[in-house]
Amino acid sequence: GQQVMQIPQYQHVQEGEDFTTYCNSSTTLSNIQWYKQRPGGHPVFLIQLVKSGEVKKQKRLTFQFGEAKKNSSLHITATQTTDVGTYFCAGPNYGGSQGNLIFGKGTKLSVKP
Amino acid sequence: DTGVSQNPRHKITKRGQNVTFRCDPISEHNRLYWYRQTLGQGPEFLTYFQNEAQLEKSRLLSDRFSAERPKGSFSTLEIQRTEQGDSAMYLCASSLAAGGPVEGTQYFGPGTRLLVL
């Protein structure tokens, strides 16, 4: 079945270092979404990418959607302790009707001050 | 607060008991989703509604689970005869159907954490 995979599962960085998480889909996606979940919290929407090769920036966060629309990445420049959490990518589930998302397992980021 | 709300936030129950959770979506959102999340995993889709119609149910949703959205606003998720394997965070999300291939952003509620003893 359709799968969304993320690597790495965990990433430990020193504050100020950069961080990247990668997302790969087994199928071509019409769009990909990124969410952040803080410890004890719920997923919070960060961004949606739609176009092939799209790059979007939010302050220190850079999101990319691959040319083939099967992979995506999130890069954080100069991490801060506020970046701690799990970052999930999610794509539409084509096995079902429109709307529901398939999430990756997430990349858990810890930042050492 | 105009976000998605869920009640209760925590529920501890004994195996075999029934539990019901409630979700109040963002008021103008016509789509409502239920997901389940266990430790170390991403949210897994359970079911979703467009207005009051339940349009899809995952294979994860056994016969012990039922969801309703009677007036197209709030929704309830009931689990009958709970089992220890039902212990998880139950997340509700809502969105405004975008129409066409690009779906509306899903906004998640704080979740209901269920522990079945």
Image (cartoon, helix red, strand yellow):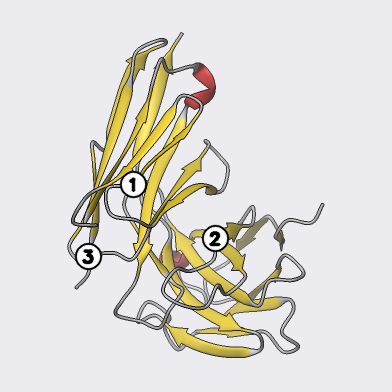
**Closer to the camera in the image, B48 or B86:** B48
Precedes in sequence: disc 1 or disc 3: 3
Q: Can residue B55 be seen in this view?
A: yes
- Amino acid type at mark 3: Thr
In the rendered structure, the answer to whether residue B94 lies left or right of residue A58 reads: right
For label 1, count other residues whose C-alpha is less than 10 Å away and answer few (under 14), some (14-19) or many (20+).
some
Residue at the (60%, 58%) spot, across then down: B107
| Amino acid at the residue labelled 2 | Thr
Q: Name the residue under label 3.
A: A28
Could you tell me residue A93's position as x and y percent?
34, 72
For marks 2 and 1, give the CA distance: 18 Å
Q: Where is residue A6 in the image (x, y as percent from the top left)?
A: 25, 46
What residue is drawn where x is 73% and y is 65%?
A: B26
Say if mark 2 contacts mark 1, CB within 8 Å: no
Q: Is mark 2 on a helix, strand or loop?
A: loop
Tell me which chain the residue with mark 2 is part of. Answer: B
Residue B6: name its quadrant: bottom right
> Residue at label 1?
A54
Are the numbered discs 3 and 2 placed on the same chain, yes or no? no
Asked if labels 3 and 1 touch by Cβ distance under 8 angstroms, the answer is no
**Residue wearing tag 2:** B105
